[in-house]
Each structure stands twice: as structure tokens, then as C-alpha cells.
Image: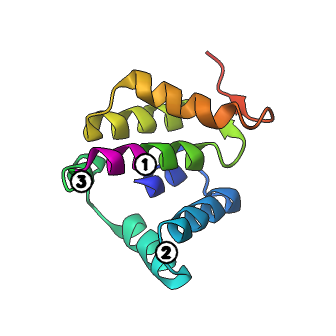
């Protein structure tokens, strides 16, 4: 699901890739496993909704959403399309829009250099 955010704003940045690698390592994956996972997700036809259906644990769902928020903000800018994807991910996971906003706010509060798309 994090790879969907990589493509959301039309550019795949090294900051975003580094964050995915860091998150993968923090979940016990090794570097090759992470690279292979990214490659597989980029080439996959599975929808966000299809992937979400395979996840039943609520704690895992929340960790995924929080990780997606971190990836979306890795380049220090939150684009409208990234917000749409985050909301689609949270909806597919059965997580409320309010919790999605809180996940975004949690990341933003730690870095004042993040810019948010204009309303």
C-alpha cells in the first residue's frame, strides 16, 4: 500500500523510497526483501482494496495507515492526490477518515518543514 503513495503525486522520490526501506527494516525485513516487495507492488495489478482484504488484525491495519502517512510526507509535501490515496487506504482497511487525519497530523507535528496542498 505504501507503493501506491509513491506513485500518487506523479514522482517517486528517494526520500520516499528510503522511508519505505526504513519501515521495512523496522518490521524485520532485510534490504533485498524490501526491494523485491517494492518491485512486486509496482508491477502488481492488485488494488488497494484487494490487499486490504488480506489484513484482519486491527493493530496491523493502524500500523499500515501510519506507515503510509509517513511515506506520503517523506518528501516534505502532502499533495491532494496523496490525501485521496490515504483516504482510500483507510477506507479499505475500515479505518475512519478522522483517524487518517490524526495519522497525518502526528507526522506533521514532528516536522514543521512539511507543506500541505492548497485547499
Q: Mark 2 points at which residue?
A: 34
Q: Do the residues labelled 1 and 2 touch (CB within 8 Å)?
A: no
In the displayed structure image, the side of residue 34 where residue 53 appears, left or right: left
Q: Do the residues labelled 3 and 2 touch (CB within 8 Å)?
A: no
Q: How far apart are marks 1 and 3 (CA)?
A: 11 Å
The picture places residue 109, in percent across and down from the top left corner, at 70, 30
The picture places residue 113, in percent across and down from the top left corner, at 80, 35
Q: How far apart are marks 1 and 2 (CA)?
A: 17 Å
Q: Which of marks 1 and 2 is nearer the N terminus?
A: 2
Q: Residue furthest bottom?
A: 32
Q: Which of marks 3 and 2 is nearer the N terminus?
A: 2
10 Å crowding of disc 3: few (<14), some (14-19), many (20+): few
Residue 63 magenta: yes
Q: Mark 3 points at which residue?
A: 55
Q: Which of marks 1 and 2 is in front?
A: 1
Q: Which residue lies furthest to the right in this view?
A: 113
Q: What residue is drawn where x is 50% and y is 25%?
A: 101
Q: Name the residue under label 1.
A: 63
Q: What residue is drawn where x is 56% and y is 32%?
A: 104
- Quarter the C terminus occupies: top right
Image: magenta residue range: 57-64
Amino acid at each position: 500500500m505504501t507503493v501506491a503513495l509513491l506513485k500518487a503525486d506523479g514522482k517517486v522520490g528517494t526520500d520516499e523510497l528510503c522511508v519505505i526501506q526504513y519501515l521495512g527494516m523496522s518490521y524485520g525485513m532485510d534490504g533485498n526483501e524490501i526491494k523485491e516487495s517494492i518491485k512486486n507492488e509496482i508491477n502488481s495489478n492488485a488494488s488497494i482494496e484487494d490487499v486490504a482484504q488480506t489484513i484482519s488484525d486491527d493493530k496491523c491495519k493502524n500500523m499500515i495507515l501510519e506507515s503510509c502517512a509517513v511515506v506520503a510526507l517523506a518528501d516534505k509535501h502532502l499533495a491532494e492526490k496523496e490525501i485521496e490515496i490515504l483516504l482510500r487506504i483507510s477506507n479499505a482497511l475500515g479505518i475512519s477518515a478522522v483517524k487518517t487525519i490524526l495519522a497525518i497530523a502526528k507526522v506533521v507535528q514532528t516536522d514543521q518543514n512539511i507543506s500541505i496542498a492548497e485547499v
